[in-house]
Image: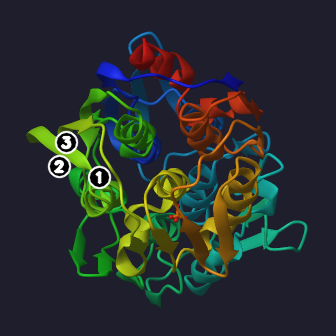
């Protein structure tokens, strides 16, 4: 994908549906009684992996791709069927980890596997806590990664203090907790996204959140509930950043989810001096939504760390790009989780931004960026990580010269029409 300099960004755009919420609607729809209709479903490859896995588990799912409406004919909590083949989770950490919590409690065995990236991502973080509940999950390569062999077991409730602030870990445990013989409690070091808690409640589960602790009661059944998926703030983040940094720009991103466990990007942009406003704030199905308006702004460096990190974990690559174009120094800390995403996002951001001429160094838990240098187009290695590709499309659009993003089509994981939408704003 070749990116060249953009003169201005103007107009209105709607980004596709939220990836996390789209996944969860398939999973909860599949294990509830009745028919769930999900609107504004994200047709990204990751969410399609979730659909394919549940089809293999016997769930009938219709996907009207023209209208982004998915209909899930739920089989109830105990209705899934043994799969006749390996469940392919593709590139999706969310599919792999969340489905493991469900499969751990079934009365059949299953095998999960995914692409080269998934086979490197840490699964001990779910194998261990689910094991404490009585689950039996084996990493078939004995390296703590997929492929995973899951033997269904009877599960017990537990109190778990998680060493990582991870919604995928928390959600796997909560889903397993639906099937346990007593209540299950998870405490995180910092609050991660709470979409599972909100949606489980809407489907009839008894879930209570108090600070960084969430408790779920075993369920007899969940009941189908239609889901409207708001626009994905993680996808909006690229246009927020681009709109702030491109001269002579003003854009409105409509209908974006601004759940407080996801809105770190908004808080950081404001901290950096952004002209960013929220309009038309309302709620759809328990999730807060707004239109986000950004105008060309002068940005200053900032310090990002602590409890805000899980609320912007997927936006750190594009924040690193913003920091290069801001004046002064930006320090990103407490973000060691970046090393175990679809790629090692600390190393990959640092080496690619250096190739563009940035003054950036990696630290153990983040990066230090001295802004204000003029960047130039460069050859970028995406490592097939969608968020790396989109971050460098933004960076490249601000630079003289050509930026060539290798493997740039990997944006189809979370935002298939990303380049077209970007082009439309640049017209
Ligand atoms: C996700 C949680 C986050 C995030 C990922 C989606 C989810 O991962 O990075 O893109 O849908 O639960 P962790 O919970 O592992 O940090």
Task: Name the mark on residue 289.
Answer: 3
Q: CA distance from mark 2 to mark 1?
A: 8 Å
Q: Is residue 389 left or right of residue 27?
A: right
Mark 3 or 1 closer to N-term? 1
How many badges with numbers are in the image?
A: 3
Q: Is residue 313 left or right of residue 53?
A: left
**Front-lying residue, 23 or 243:** 243
Q: Which residue position holds label 1?
A: 199
Mark 2 or 1 closer to N-term? 1
Question: Is the residue 374 above or below the residue 369 in the image?
Answer: above
Local crowd at mark 2 within 10 Å, few (<14), some, or many (≥20)?
A: some
Q: Quadrant of residue 34?
A: top left
Q: Quadrant of residue 349?
A: bottom right
Query: Quick one: quadrant of the N terminus?
Result: top right
Discs 3/1, front: 3
Q: CA distance from mark 3 to mark 1?
A: 15 Å
User: Dot 1: what SS?
Assistant: helix
User: Dot 3: what SS?
Assistant: strand
Local crowd at mark 3 within 10 Å, few (<14), some, or many (≥20)?
A: many
Q: Is mark 3 within 8 Å of ligand 1?
A: no
- Residue at position x 43%, y 68% in the image: 310
Question: Is the residue 243 above or below the residue 40 in the image?
Answer: below
Q: Which residue position holds label 2?
A: 286
Q: CA distance from mark 3 to mark 2?
A: 9 Å
Task: Name the mark on residue 406.
Answer: none
- Residue at position x 59%, y 74% in the image: 366
Residue 195 seen from this side: yes
Q: Position of residue 410 (x, y in %)?
A: 69, 33
Q: As drawn, which residue projects farthest toward the right?
A: 141
């Amino acid at each position: 994908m070749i990116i060249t300099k953009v003169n201005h960004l103007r107009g209105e755009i709607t980004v596709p549906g939220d990836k996390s919420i789209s996944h969860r609607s398939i999973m909860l729809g599949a294990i509830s009684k009745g028919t769930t209709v999900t609107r504004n479903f994200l047709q990204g490859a990751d969410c399609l992996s979730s659909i394919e896995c549940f089809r293999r588990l016997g769930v009938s799912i219709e996907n009207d791709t023209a209208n982004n409406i998915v209909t899930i004919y739920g089989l109830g909590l105990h209705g899934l069927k043994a799969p006749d083949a390996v469940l392919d989770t593709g590139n999706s950490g969310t599919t792999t980890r969340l489905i493991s919590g469900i499969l751990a409690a079934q009365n059949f065995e299953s095998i999960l596997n995914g692409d080269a990236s998934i086979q490197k991502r840490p699964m001990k973080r779910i194998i261990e806590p689910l094991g404490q509940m009585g689950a039996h999950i084996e990493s078939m390569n004995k390296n703590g990664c997929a492929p995973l062999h899951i033997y269904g077991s009877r599960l017990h409730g537990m109190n778990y203090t998680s060493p990582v602030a991870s919604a995928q870990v928390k959600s796997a445990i909560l889903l397993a907790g639906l099937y346990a013989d007593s209540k299950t409690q998870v405490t995180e070091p910092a609050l991660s996204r709470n979409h599972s808690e909100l949606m489980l409640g809407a489907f009839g589960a008894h879930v209570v959140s108090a600070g960084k602790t969430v408790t779920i009661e075993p369920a007899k059944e969940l009941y189908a509930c239609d889901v409207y998926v708001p626009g994905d703030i993680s996808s909006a983040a690229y246009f927020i950043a681009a709109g702030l940094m491109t001269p002579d720009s003003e854009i409105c991103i409509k209908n974006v989810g601004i759940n407080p466990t996801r809105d770190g990007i908004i808080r950081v942009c404001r901290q950096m001096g952004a002209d960013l406003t929220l309009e038309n704030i309302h709620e759809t199905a328990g999730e807060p939504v707004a239109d986000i308006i950004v105008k060309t702004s002068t940005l200053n460096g900032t310090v990002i760390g602590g409890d805000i990190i899980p609320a912007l974990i997927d936006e750190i690559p594009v924040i690193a790009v913003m920091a290069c174009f801001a004046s002064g120094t930006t320090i990103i800390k407490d973000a060691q989780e970046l090393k175990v995403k679809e790629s090692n996002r600390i190393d990959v951001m640092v080496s690619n931004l250096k190739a563009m001429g940035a003054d950036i160094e990696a630290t153990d838990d983040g990066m230090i960026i001295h802004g204000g240098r003029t960047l130039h187009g460069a050859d970028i290695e995406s490592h097939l990580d969608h968020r790396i590709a989109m971050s460098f499309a933004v960076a490249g659009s601000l630079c003289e010269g050509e930026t060539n993003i290798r493997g740039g089509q990997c944006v189809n994981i979370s935002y298939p029409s990303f380049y077209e939408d970007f082009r439309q704003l640049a017209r």
